[in-house]
Image: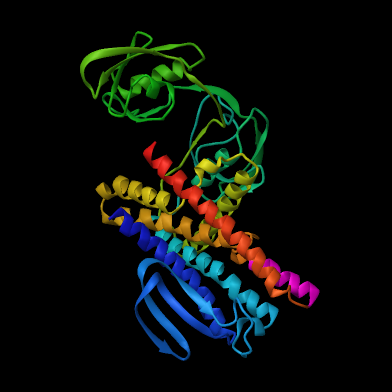
Amino acid sequence: MNIIVAIFILGVIVIIHELGHFLLAKANGITVTEFSVGMGPRLASFVRKGTRYSLKLFPIGGSCMMLGEDETVEDEGAFHKKGVWARFSVIFAGAFFNFVFAFLLALILLGDAGVDKPYITDIKNGEASDGILEKGDLITGIDGSPIHFSREIRYYYYFNELVQEPVKISYIRDGVKNSALITPKEIFQLGCNYDGTGDKAVIAYVAEGYPLDKAGIAEGDVIVSMNETQISSGKDMETYLDSNPLTKDPVTVTYLKSGKGDPITVTVTPKSVISMGWNYNEYREKVSTLQVVKYSFFELKLNIVNTIKSVFYLVTGRVSVKEIAGPVGIVNYVGDIVSESHSYGIRVMLLSLIDFSILISANLGVMNLLPLPALDGGRLIFLLIEAVRRKPVPKEKEAMVHMVGMALLMLLMVFVLFNDIKNIMS
């Protein structure tokens, strides 16, 4: 079922891409010889106004074949007979339609689920933001990078490692725009969340790779003492940590596994992290129709920018090629989404898949516009050269470049397939 869902998502996104080429080709008087849904042998087809519409065996995308696209044809409807900017619009339309599709999906997602507005929910005493920012401040920028969603704060941390140097924070308080320089501070963490209002100090979340996780403490375990100080409730734990801020010194933690059995005592060393000293909202809230439209543009922009940044970091070596995912990896991600969300109901599962589809559609649009041979972006480069030179690059030379690019692309796909399988098995 995961494979079927993943193929459906990829298939729809690719068909939308090809539909962009198709509609702009028709609008510019270019003869489309075949528009197909799926790949491989034809299952069914019909011809209308010179175009064969086909349904093919493998539901993995589609294609838009245009007359004179790869060869010279003496026909007024041939692709190469049209002007530079007409051809440019046809090639660009595929990626543009992916962006439009991602925007429409964002309208559905944000209209139903709402927006995660990046306002501060808590200021940690004694840390970087204490005395400068306040609970309720709406973060609008970090060091010149616009912030529209809470997720963008997390992404900023991912792409820009925090160090103990001043960071410019732009924010809105009581409708007034403000900015301040805040220097992140070193703090120490055990890596957990807990309910501060509960009758027991129940662990609600444990961060992977942090001290409590390494010590074997998990979600649902109950803390009963820290450094021999009895902890009877979530409030007790909150009071203890406020009165005894964590340092680099080891902490003795006694807990009950899932709240039952004999007490287990472990000694953990808090992890050093650089912090802005705030907690920010991570939940979605409903917004007006006009705001849904506005934030949908921001959602599209976020996915486009993150894809471009990821490509840049991949090229510069800041991101490993092992992190590239192909079709097999996408099937695996879809499986994770379904398994993690289905218990919350069909609505949550569908919204999660829509969220993932926004990423994939925007990603496909950006990747196709990369100025590489065999991709739409490479073809656009040749059209721009033709516009500057006022004559086309010889077709045989362009074809040779695209052939080499296609061969390299196939090698990359083999690597990505191997990488996907390796990551899943490990």
Residue 143 is situated, as x and y percent measured from the top left of the image, at: 66, 42
* Residue 137, visible in the rendered structure: no
* Residue 68, visible in the rendered structure: yes
Q: Main secondary structure of the magenta part?
A: helix
Q: Is residue 256 left or right of residue 212?
A: left
Residue 256 is situated, as x and y percent measured from the top left of the image, at: 25, 18
What residue is at 60 percent from the left and 52 percent from the top?
308
| Residue 71 sits in quarter | bottom right
Could you say which is closer to the camera, residue 403 or residue 33? 403
In the displayed structure, 396 sits above or below 151; it is below
In the displayed structure, 56 sits above or below 328; it is below
- Colour scheme employed for the rendering of this structure: rainbow
Q: Residue furthest top?
A: 228
What residue is at 68 percent from the left and 72 percent from the top?
396
Q: Quadrant of the C terminus?
A: top left
Q: Residue furthest left?
A: 261
Is residue 11 located in the magenta-colored stretch of the structure? no
Q: Is residue 172 left or right of residue 329?
A: right
Q: Quadrant of the N terminus?
A: bottom left
Residue 413 is situated, as x and y percent measured from the top left of the image, at: 50, 53
Which contiguous range is marked in magenta?
Answer: 379-390
Is residue 382 located in the magenta-colored stretch of the structure? yes
Q: Is residue 172 left or right of residue 150?
A: right
What residue is at 43 percent from the left and 46 percent from the top?
420
Residue 345 is situated, as x and y percent measured from the top left of the image, at: 25, 52
Q: Is residue 286 left or right of residue 305?
A: left
Q: Residue furthest right?
A: 389
